[in-house]
């Protein structure tokens, strides 16, 4: 395979980040004391959006309006946050930021910013519920929106700060691909899965077949596969809303809400390729889809098939990159990937 190419689909984008899709910016806010945080995706102009939930324990805000049959066609921003249900308050801070900028869905003389959100459970990672009467996530959302730009950090930041999997720290990951058709598809994900991104505990990633270059160490798959590779490894004492991989898949193509939902469904295949097991009863696995329309061109039937394959591949890469970039800390309950790799 040529360097810099992924399964014949195309090359990684300039940044290899969600923001390789024109019209998007990303910002983080991180609270190290709580070991939690928020990640915000801002749309320069309202973008067509959809969502698909494949896990059994989601936590969301404003997702019903994304159904293709409902009135609102586009969103101003998306939020991924730690903090369990408390973290949904981060969207209020983003709404405040957008309202200050005059953004939002017009309702008579009023502007209502449309900011769907999804959360993951990380309350056990740090200070827990020690914030007093009100949680800090509204302010974290505002802070993340203020910091949004084209370049952003991966790993133990934003929504990925307190994320863990069964045997390795999770994190915030992103990846992109510019397709041979000219469209770009990119992903951003916070990995807090019940299962594992590693083959039999690591250091090899299940996502290895989709890796471009050595973006998550270039180890490939182990050969032969360990005899225990297909034994499901999950967090002990699994409970609802305690495990979640939440993500965004984006493209610069012009899509309808229904077409965007198909892209979100395809992106869930990337979960299944990068995490074992995925989509369990106790994961809140969710993918938002965004179509900015920046290239002002609709994909044809063949393009949509290619984009669906790319959505799965780029999502699997983003999951592995988030875990690969996570950094160790004194309070960790599981090692970071860099620590597991050092034991080889």
Image (spheres, rainbow, N blue to C red):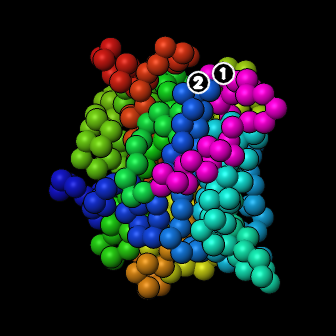
Q: Is residue 105 visible?
A: yes
Specify the quadrant of the image occupied by residue 73.
bottom right
Quarter of the image with the C terminus is top left
Quarter of the image with the N terminus is bottom left
Location of residue 169 in the rendering, given as x and y in whole percent from the top left corner? 50, 27
288 with respect to 153 (left or right): right
- Count the labels in the image: 2
Q: Are marks 2 and 1 in contact (CB under 8 Å)?
A: yes
Q: CA distance from mark 2 to mark 1?
A: 6 Å
* Label 2 neighbour load within 10 Å: few <14, some 14-19, many 20+: few
Which residue is depicted at the point 71% across and 32% down?
Answer: 242
* Label 1 neighbour load within 10 Å: few <14, some 14-19, many 20+: some
Quick one: label 2 or label 1, which is nearer the N terminus? 2
- Asked if residue 169 is among those painted magenta in the image, a careful observer would answer no
In the picture, the disc for residue 127 is 1
Location of residue 135 in the rendering, given as x and y in whole percent from the top left corner? 74, 36
Asked which secondary structure carries label 2, the reply is: loop
Specify the quadrant of the image occupied by residue 8.
bottom left
According to the image, label 2 marks what residue? 33
SS assignment for the magenta stretch, majority: loop
In the picture, the disc for residue 281 is none
Please state the extent of the stretch shown in magenta in the rendering: 120-148
Location of residue 24 in the rendering, given as x and y in whole percent from the top left corner? 47, 65
Q: Is residue 38 above or below residue 334?
A: below
Towards the viewer: 275 or 67: 67
Which residue is depicted at the point 42% across and 57% down?
Answer: 149
């Amino acid at each position: 395979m040529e360097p810099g190419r992924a399964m014949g689909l195309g090359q990684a984008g300039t940044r290899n980040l969600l923001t390789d899709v024109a019209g998007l910016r990303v910002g983080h806010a991180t609270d190290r004391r709580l070991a939690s945080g928020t990640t915000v995706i801002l749309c320069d102009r309202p973008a067509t959006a959809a969502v698909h939930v494949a896990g059994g324990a989601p936590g969301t805000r404003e997702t019903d309006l994304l159904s293709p049959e409902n009135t609102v066609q586009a969103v101003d921003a998306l939020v991924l946050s730690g903090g369990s249900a408390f973290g949904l308050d981060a969207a209020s801070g983003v709404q405040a930021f957008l309202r200050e900028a005059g953004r939002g869905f017009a309702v008579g003389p009023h502007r209502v910013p449309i900011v769907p959100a999804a959360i993951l459970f990380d309350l056990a990672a740090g200070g827990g519920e020690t914030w007093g009467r009100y949680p800090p996530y509204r302010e974290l959302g505002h802070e993340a929106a203020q910091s949004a730009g084209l370049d952003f950090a991966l790993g133990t930041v934003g929504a990925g700060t307190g994320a863990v999997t069964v045997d390795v720290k999770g994190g915030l990951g992103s990846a992109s691909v510019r397709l041979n058709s000219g469209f770009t598809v990119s992903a951003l994900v916070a990995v807090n899965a019940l299962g594992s991104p590693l083959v039999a505990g690591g250091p090899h990633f299940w996502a290895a077949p989709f890796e471009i270059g050595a973006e998550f160490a270039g180890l490939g798959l182990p050969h032969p596969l360990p005899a225990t590779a297909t034994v499901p490894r999950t967090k002990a004492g699994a409970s609802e809303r305690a495990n979640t991989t939440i993500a965004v898949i984006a493209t610069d193509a012009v899509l309808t809400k229904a077409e965007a939902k198909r892209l979100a469904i395809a992106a869930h295949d990337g979960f299944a390729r990068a995490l074992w097991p995925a989509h369990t009863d106790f994961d809140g696995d969710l993918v938002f889809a965004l179509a900015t329309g920046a290239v002002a061109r609709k994909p044809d039937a063949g393009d949509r098939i290619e984009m669906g394959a790319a959505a799965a591949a780029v999502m699997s890469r983003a999951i592995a990159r988030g875990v690969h970039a996570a950094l160790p800390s004194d309070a960790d309950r599981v090692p970071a990937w860099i620590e597991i790799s050092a034991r080889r």
